[in-house]
Amino acid sequence: MPYEQIEKLRRGLTPLHSPDNADGVRGKVRAAVLVPIFERDGELYILFIKRSNTVATHQGQVAFPGGRSEPEDPDILTTALREAYEEVGLAPESVEVLGRLTSAATMTSNYMVTPFVGVIGVPTDLRADEHEVAEIFSVPVAALKDPAFRGRYEWNRGGSVQSYPAILYGEQPIWGLTLRITEELLELL
C-alpha cells in the first residue's frame, strides 16, 4: 500500500523543475523545507522537528527541517537538502525527492517557504543540531488524517493569545505554516 500512496503523491506534486510561483516573493526571504516521508511496518510516517528555543525565529515550534536560502545555493531545492543535512543529519543522497508543494509565506517572520517532499529510509541515525533543533519526531500519516487529533492551539504572542487550528498529536502541536504544508500533503495522499 505505501508504494501506491507514494506514486499517487509523486503524480500530485509539482514537478521539481517547474517554474516556482513568484507571487508574493518580493520583499520576502527565500527559504525551503524538506518534508521527509518514510514507511515503517507498512505505514507511512512524516518526520518533523521541534525548533530549539535558541533560534532567531519560530522558537519551540514544530516544523520541517529547513531554512533560509544562502547565496551559494544554486537553487531552492539545494537549500532544502542542505538545511535538512545541517539540522538533522539527513544526507542529501539518501533522499528521493518526489516534487514540491505550494510555496507559502510565514505569518510573522517574512519568509517565503518552498516545501519539497522526499522519501527517506527509516530514520535510525539522525542527529539534531543542538543549536537549532530540540527534538526530531515522526507521526503516522493515519494519525495526521484522523479528526480525533484536530483541535485548536492557543499561541501567546507578546501577551496576546491567539487561537489557531492544529493537529494535536502527542506533545507537539502542529499549526501555522507547518499545518498548511501538512494538510496540502495529506490531500495528495
Image (cartoon, rainbow, N blue to C red):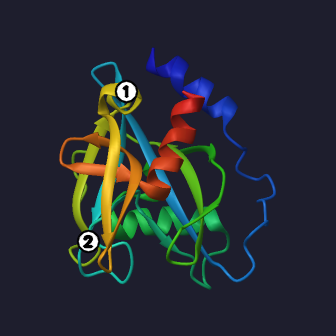
Between 155 and 183, the one lying in front of the other is 155
| Mark 1, other Cα within 10 Å: few <14 / some 14–19 / many ≥20 | few
Q: Residue drawn 65% across and 79% down?
A: 28
- Name the residue: 38% across, 46% down: 166
- The amino acid type found where label 2 is placed reads Asp
Q: Please report the residue visible at 36 percent of the width from the left and 57 percent of the height from the top.
A: 90
- Give the mark nearer the N terminus: 2 vs 1: 2
Q: Amino acid at mark 1?
A: Pro
- Judged from the image, the secondary structure of the residue bearing numbered disc 2 is loop
On screen, 125 above or below 53? above
User: Residue 93, can we see it?
Assistant: no
Residue 43: image location, x then y, percent: 34, 23
Question: Which is more toward the observer, 62 or 99?
Answer: 62
Q: How many marks?
A: 2
When asked about the image quadrant of residue 52, the answer is bottom left
Q: Residues within 10 Å of mark 2 (few under 14, many from 20)?
A: some
Kindly report the distance in space between the C-alpha atoms of the residues bearing marks 2 and 1: 33 Å
- Helix, strand or loop at mark 1: helix
Residue ID for mark 1 = 147
Provide residue 133's location: percent of width, then percent of height.
26, 68
Image depth: mark 2 or mark 1 in front:
1
77 left or right, relative to 5: right
Q: Nearer the viewer, residue 124 or 155?
A: 155
Q: Vertically, is 176 above or below 46?
A: below
Place of residue 167 in the rendered image (x, y in percent of width and height, measured from the top left): 35, 41
Q: Which residue is mark 2?
A: 129
The residue located at (66%, 51%) in the rendering is: 102
> What numbered label is drawn on residue 9?
none
* Quadrant for the C terminus in the image: top right
Q: Are marks 2 and 1 in contact (CB under 8 Å)?
A: no
Q: Is 32 on the left or on the right of 141, as rendered?
A: right
